[in-house]
Amino acid sequence: TDTALIVVAAGSGARLGAAREGKPVPKAFAEFAGVTLLEHALRGIDWVAERVVVVVPPGFEAEAATIAARAGVRADVVPGGATRADSVLAGLAAAGDAQHVLVHDAARALTPATPFDRVRAALEAGAVAVVPVLPVVDTVRSVDTVRSVDPARSAAAAGEEGEAAEHVLGERLGAVVDRATLRAMQTPQGFDAAVLRRAYEAAGAARAASTDDAQLVQALGEPVLAVPGDELAFKITTRADAERAEALLAKEAG
Ligand code: C5P
């Protein structure tokens, strides 16, 4: 069956703060061990799908096409949007009529073949949505924001509306969650293409709040299957992640 792979690489990477020639550069175009993140992400993935769509910040299409060619991937390059969800939608619009769609973060640039393989296999076995996951090693807690009403400030701010001036004191630990029941979501996430399109349609503008495609599919009431993810599929987000990636690449080269 026909599969399309959407690689979303249109983020700014503000948390990483990468620069090229002294100017901020989108994360996917920052270099790791001398090679752009996007090229690392695309290397060795030509087998994954019959059609590859790469979504990049507007203005970076030509550079992305060169990078894809260098990585040995025939890809359509399209401009992304302001949020990850908008970028996925842009990718979907260029994905054609493939039966299955895989959505992958370029930021998970060192993802090995195994998760791609597992996700593809699950789709071929009839799953409508598949997500690679990892167990959570940290104890995880939700928090509530604690606000206080300062009487002195309220009096000053009372004005016409008479609204109390609230200010944030900090965070208070909320519910305890048993980490044994938690999983961290990774990509590539795989979907029946029609179901994913329906999920985005149903979400409408609310998609902006989503950082995870499976979440939108789940909101439709569709079952989402979890398969084992991979430590190497970590998302390069912070400087520390970047250092980990560089160290792994150096080991590989040496
Ligand atoms: O921001 P975050 O690291 O969670 O982004 C995950 C992936 O989504 C990255 O590969 C990033 O390039 C992509 N993204 C995008 N368009 C955006 C924001 C993020 O393609 N507007």
Image (tube, grey):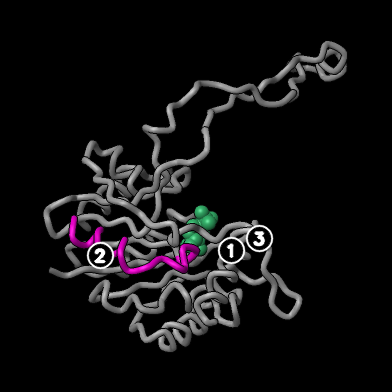
Tag 3 residue: 239
Which residue is depicted at the point 12% across and 53% down? 126
Tag 1 residue: 244
Q: Are marks 3 and 1 in contact (CB under 8 Å)?
A: no
Q: In the picture provided, is 148 more to the left or to the right than 83?
A: right
Q: In the picture provided, is 48 more to the left or to the right than 13?
A: left
Numbered badge on residue 117: 2
Q: In the picture provided, is 117 more to the left or to the right than 143?
A: left
Tag 3: Cα neighbours inside 10 Å, few (<14), some, or many (≥20)?
few
Quadrant in the picture for the C terminus: bottom right
Quadrant in the picture for the N terminus: bottom left
Numbered badge on residue 236: none
Q: Which residues are magenta?
A: 106-122
N-term-proximal mark, 2 vs 1? 2
Q: Are marks 2 and 1 in contact (CB under 8 Å)?
A: no
Tag 1: amino acid: Arg
Q: Which image quadrant is residue 76 in?
A: bottom left
Which residue is depicted at the point 44% across and 62% down? 232
Q: Is residue 147 magenta?
A: no
Tag 2: amino acid: Asp
Element type where label 2 sits in the image: helix
| Cα distance between the residues tagged 2 and 1 | 24 Å
